[in-house]
Amino acid sequence: MSFDQIAWLPLCAGVTGVGLVLSFLLLRRRGAAAGLRGAAWSLLPLAAYLTGALPALWQVGTAVVGFFAGLVLSPLVWAGVAVTALSAVLFLVSGVLRRRGSPAPAAAGPSVTAKPGAAASAGAAGAAGALPGSRSQPQPQPQPRAGKAAPAAKPAADDDFSDIEAILKRRGIG
């Protein structure tokens, strides 16, 4: 049915009339606030007809209905929805993997077992040596204190459990 085939004035006036009757009943049962709100909603169809907004509302309504009908009935659209869902799942999985701290490839940076100061001093020496006319001076390495022996470097896997081991030792477990 097209827009021109509908008698809009009687339809809008009828919907407004029924709405006003229901608004009067709301006024008596639930109070003035509910009745006035119902009357406001009831006057909108007649206002849309009188202002000439009905053709625009008709076009919007048919466009929305056509979009959703095409969405539900088109296998191509459902394939797009599936690809979108797959993309969302991949984003979520990558976020979980980032939080867990998955190891980076070896070529991406210094190794996990390297000393933290070694990478910084190597980067500074490399940057200074790269400039023309600059002299590379070795950075003095911090000396361990004479009173205490330096603890042996633990493997990277033990770093994950060091906090847990400390807690267990404090509580006298293990």
Image (spheres, helix red, strand yellow):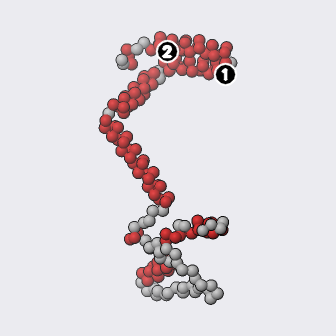
Q: Which residue is mark 1?
A: 33
Q: Give how far across and how far down residue 122 sits, in percent.
A: 46, 80
- Asked where in the image residue 69 lies, by quadrant, the reply is top left
Secondary element at image label 1: helix
Amino acid type at image mark 2: Cys
At 35% from the left and 37% from the top, the residue drawn is 78
Q: Give how far across and how far down residue 83 sits, in percent.
A: 36, 44
Q: Which residue is mark 2?
A: 12
Q: Quadrant of the N terminus?
A: top left
At 53% from the left and 67% from the top, the residue drawn is 160
Q: Earlier in the sequence, mark 2 or mark 1?
A: 2
Q: Residues within 10 Å of mark 2 (few under 14, many from 20)?
A: many
Please state if 135 lies on the left or on the right of 147 as rendered.
left
142 lies above or below 107: below
Amino acid type at image mark 1: Ala
Q: Give how far across and how far down residue 29 sits, in percent.
A: 66, 15
At 54% from the left and 86% from the top, the residue drawn is 140
Q: Tell me the tag on residue 24.
A: none
The residue nearer to you, when weighing 120 against 2, is 120
Q: Specify the farthest residue to the right.
A: 31
Whether residue 12 is visible to the viewer of this picture, yes or no, is yes
The residue nearer to you, when weighing 61 against 143, is 143
Q: Quadrant of the C terminus?
A: bottom right
Whether residue 120 is visible to the viewer of this picture, yes or no, is no
Tag in front: 2 or 1:
1
Secondary element at image label 2: helix
Please state if 1 lies on the left or on the right of 12 as rendered.
left
